[in-house]
Image (spheres, helix red, strand yellow):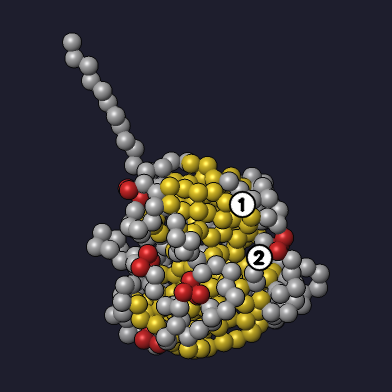
Amino acid sequence: MSKFFIVFLASCSFFSKVSGQVTPSTFENIECLLTFGQSSTPSWGDDDHVQIHFFAIPETETKPIYIRVFDPSTGGALDTPNGPFNTKTSFTIYGGKGAYSIKEARSINPKKNFDKGVIIDRKTFYNEDKFDQKWYSFGPINPKEGEFSKEMKAYIFKVICKGGVGNDGNAYKYALSYDSKSLVPVEGGNAFTYEMCFRLKKGKNQTAHVYPFINKNVISVQQYNFDADNDIDMRLTSVTKKLNFVKESPNGKWSTSKHLIDEGEKNTSIDFQLIKKTDDYNDMTIYFLNQYNEAVPFFSSPIGGVPKYKYMIDVNYKFD
């Protein structure tokens, strides 16, 4: 594991207590995740047709858990058609050695070795009405089946959503739960990823948030966003920055910008805000690299909480 991704520090609490633990979370204010079929073009917003998420379960957890997927099939009201629906999507749950520790799984544009680990469960979905806007539950899963991370003091599961044959977009969400039929949050659980393809909520001025965690070794972050259609204003807010504007991408292309990290931003989350300019839906992809070109994780529940800018008031007194 990269030494630059040790996020557990005495001053920083990892685990969240967010009710429901749905990904994308209420903190992120994102409509859904998206994965397109292999025959779709990148201009739809998905650059590689693969999406990887990780779920962290505290090492002390002993109860069985479920990893749930909302609307896993294509062809429903939330999905993106490209002609008649013809797309298959697979969801695979991994635990055991290599599920998290292998670096390819924590990189962007995965090509090989990203699917290492022990397969716990797998299912392929297609155009099925029975799963439209409904939850499907993988499990029960023994938390100890995940790969243990000493640094994170947690068992980590990897979920790979992979677009198969077809050219449509599959819109979905994840959740951790103690129950297979309802959302009962797993105490202390959290989800994170290193690259995300997602749909922004419809409506002008809707604001989505992405929360990269900045550990003590990071001195700069390079953000990359794809296919934003020049339809968003992007800005960065943190404990030391307020409303720093970020370069957005046009249709089917990448845009990037570099952001230096202040000492006060280390061991905190920073907030990349994406503000819609129009009332239309928009599908796009985003990721972040540090100065070593390593992917930076971002969490459904931001580590340390939502960052708030700390106002600094400098008052100069003049005495006669």
Which residue in the protein does label 2 denote? 46
Quarter placement of the N terminus: bottom left
Toward which corner of the image does residue 96 lie, by quadrant?
Answer: bottom left
For marks 1 and 2, give the one nearer the viewer.
1
- Residue positioned 51% across, 88% down in the render: 119
Q: Nearer the viewer, residue 68 or 161?
A: 161
The spot of residue 159 in percent (x, y) is 52, 78
- Residue positioned 39% across, 82% down in the render: 147
Name which residue type carries label 1: Ser
Name which residue type carries label 2: Asp
The numbered disc on residue 255 is 1
Task: Tell me: residue 72, above or below residue 6.
Answer: below
Q: Is residue 245 left or right of residue 227?
A: left
Task: Tell me: residue 17, above or below residue 73.
Answer: above
- Residue positioned 59% across, 55% down in the render: 225
Q: Could you tell me if residue 124 is visible in this image?
A: yes
